[in-house]
Image (cartoon, rainbow, N blue to C red):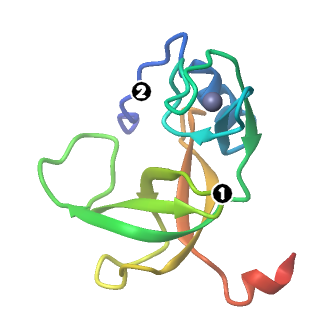
């Protein structure tokens, strides 16, 4: 029997575009077209200038763990536990909550450098996740 798949997030008018960017391999950050303020999660109006006009930039994907939690229960089908969920301060200045992979739950710590990548489930669904930054990543670009 096939392994159950991940629960899919709701994708509506205000955030469906963000998931489409993820499906295209990009970690997007919404930007106010009027005052250039970045915001996440996606929403229709700028909290700084109330403009409804927006575009987006592609994040470099680098950031640091500002908080995290390790989920053991309840265990839903389609996920591998324990799940490490991190709140990441991206270099661009916005925050993003996502799963941390390639890291033991004992090794995650505040301030650790992480980098994003687009994870693809067996059913083809794509979702941004993080993994510990590789050594020397700051010098790679
Ligand atoms: Zn604005």
- Residue 136 vertical position relative to residue 20 in the rendered view, above or below: below
Ligand 1 located in image quadrant: top right
The one nearer the camera, 140 or 2, is 140
Q: Position of residue 27 (x, y in %)?
A: 66, 45
Instruction: Confirm if mark 1 falls within 8 A of ligand 1.
Output: no
- Quadrant where the N terminus is found in the figure: top left
Foreground label between 2 and 1: 1
Q: Secondary structure at mark 1?
A: loop
Which residue bears the numbered disc 1?
92
Q: On the image, which quarter does residue 117 sit in? A: bottom right
Q: Is residue 84 visible?
A: yes
Q: Is residue 82 left or right of residue 61?
A: left
- Residue 100 vertical position relative to residue 18 in the rendered view, above or below: below
Which residue in the rendered view is the most extreme toward the left? 74
Q: Is residue 96 left or right of residue 18?
A: left
- Residue 13 vertical position relative to residue 9 in the rendered view, above or below: above
Whether residues under marks 2 and 1 lie with C-beta atoms below 8 angstroms apart, the answer is: no
Q: Which residue does the image show at 69% across and 17% down from the upper left?
A: 53
Q: Position of residue 69 (x, y in %)?
A: 25, 64
Q: Is residue 25 visible?
A: no
| CA distance for labels 2 and 1 | 24 Å
Q: Which residue does the image show at 27% across and 59% down from the upper left?
A: 81
Which residue bears the numbered disc 2?
9
Q: Position of residue 22 (x, y in %)?
A: 65, 37
Q: Which residue does the image show at 31% across and 65% down from the upper left?
A: 68
Q: Position of residue 125 (x, y in %)?
A: 56, 33
The one nearer the camera, 122 or 69, is 69
Q: Secondary structure at mark 2?
A: loop
The one nearer the camera, 121 or 114, is 114
Q: Which residue does the image show at 87% across and 75% down from the upper left?
A: 141
Q: Earlier in the sequence, mark 2 or mark 1?
A: 2
Q: On the image, which quarter does residue 25 sit in? A: top right
């Amino acid at each position: 029997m096939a392994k159950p798949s991940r629960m899919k997030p709701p994708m509506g008018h205000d955030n469906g575009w963000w998931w489409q960017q993820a499906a295209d391999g990009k970690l997007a950050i919404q930007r106010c077209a009027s005052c250039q303020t970045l915001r996440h999660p996606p929403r229709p109006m700028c909290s700084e200038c109330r403009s409804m006009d927006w575009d987006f930039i592609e994040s470099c994907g680098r950031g640091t763990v500002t908080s995290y939690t390790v989920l053991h229960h309840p265990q839903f089908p389609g996920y591998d536990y324990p799940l490490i969920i991190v709140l990441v301060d991206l270099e661009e200045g916005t925050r993003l909550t996502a799963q941390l992979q390639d890291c033991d739950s004992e090794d995650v710590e505040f301030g650790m450098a992480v980098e994003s990548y687009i994870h693809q489930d067996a059913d083809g669904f794509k979702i941004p996740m993080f993994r510990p930054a590789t050594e020397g990543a700051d010098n790679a670009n």
